[in-house]
Image: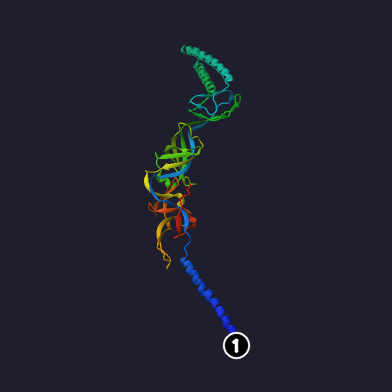
Amino acid sequence: MLKRMSIMIIILAIVFGGIFWFLGYFKPKMVNQYFSSFQPPPVSVSSATAETSSRTPFLESTGTVIAVQEVVVTTEVAGLIQSINFKSGQDVDKGALLVKLDTSVDQAELKGLIASGKLAEANFKRDKQLIERKAVSSLDYETSLASLSTAEANIESQKATISKKSIRAPFSGKLGIRKVDLGEYLQAGSPIVSLQALDQVYVNFSLPEHHFSQVRLGQTAIVTVAAWPEKEFKGQITAIDSRISEATRNFTIQATIDNPEHELLPGMFSEVRLITGQPRDLVTVPEQAVERKLYGTSVFVISETNAEPAPDSGEEAKTVLTVERRYIKTGLTLDGYVEVISGLEDGEQVVVAGQLKLQNGSHVVINNTVKLN
């Protein structure tokens, strides 16, 4: 009985010892050997080359198109519309008759005032002759003179009222959509039609205060609008606001742009590129290659390295492509390319697609068959 138990204990010791040896020594050793020689398959990426190109420094913003002159034509006096002498959207010259109000009652009143004026003039002439002969008192003479002046003033006032009932364009420009109808009674100040001078327009836009030192009168502004996406409108900076907004810490700039075809209309949203210097050579990479994170801006740089074969494999060393995360300092962004101020040299290759699968030292294979937009 004792002998059997001893044999069983020996067998169990051998079994459990083998298990512990396998799990504690042999298996970890095999796993370590596997992972020490394991190479993950290379990651397929797209690449681009950092290139030196001539770029013009600029600042970007958004703005609004504003007419150089813009007004809503109104009437100073009330009256019934007798005629409308324009069409919506029409180009008009300065002084063109737009609307004429009824003046029949005013004309009748004017005739009465003219008659009163003639009587006052006759009385004045008679009293003037009599005062020379001292046949009337000076009070009567002064009264007739005042009556004549009053009559003449009343006539001029009535003529001015009649003139104001012919509503004319205050400057040359393009009319909007009319807001009145024939026969309508207009109160003083009622809007009739908008009028804009469009041969030149303003574009007002804002920039942060730290750019104030870079902005000068006479600089070129390039404007694009959604209505004409393929066209650029060039103008010059003609005004810079004299104060910084306390709410936004921005300052306003005004560019003046020639608009002979009237393609730019007041109220249009615009994208503005303000040229701040002369063209210079910059190292640039596609915008897709740049990763911006809280701890810095970086790119993955592709380089060639020699891969040593496994011991006793009989293979020769071969060249493979690996990547290195490199932190860079960036500048301008233009047409999908980013200026690299430091951290990258002309001619180095960078990854533009596939960065999420990469880390320092990852092996890659380049596949540029897919074009990036």
Q: Residue 172's spot in the image, x, y percent?
A: 48, 28
Q: Residue 23's spot in the image, x, y percent?
A: 53, 74
> Tag 1, which secondary structure?
helix
Q: Which residue is mark 1?
A: 3
Q: Residue 132's spot in the image, x, y percent?
A: 46, 12
Against 45, is 169 above or below? above
- Looking at the rendered structure, the kind of residue marked 1 is Lys
Point 44% across, 35% down: residue: 257
Q: Residues within 10 Å of mark 1 (few under 14, many from 20)?
A: few
The answer to whether 263 appears left or right of 180 in the picture is left
Against 77, is 373 above or below? below
In front here: 114 or 201? 201
Point 47% across, 69% down: residue: 33
Residue 19 sits in which quadrant?
bottom right
In front here: 198 or 47? 47
Point 52% across, 74% down: residue: 24
Q: Dividing the image into 4 quarters, which one contains the N terminus?
A: bottom right
Residue found at the far bottom of this picture: 2
Point 54% across, 79% down: residue: 17
Q: Is residue 290 visible?
A: no
Against 226, is 161 above or below? above
Residue 328 sits in which quadrant?
bottom left
Q: Residue 340's spot in the image, x, y percent?
A: 40, 51
In front here: 57 or 165? 57
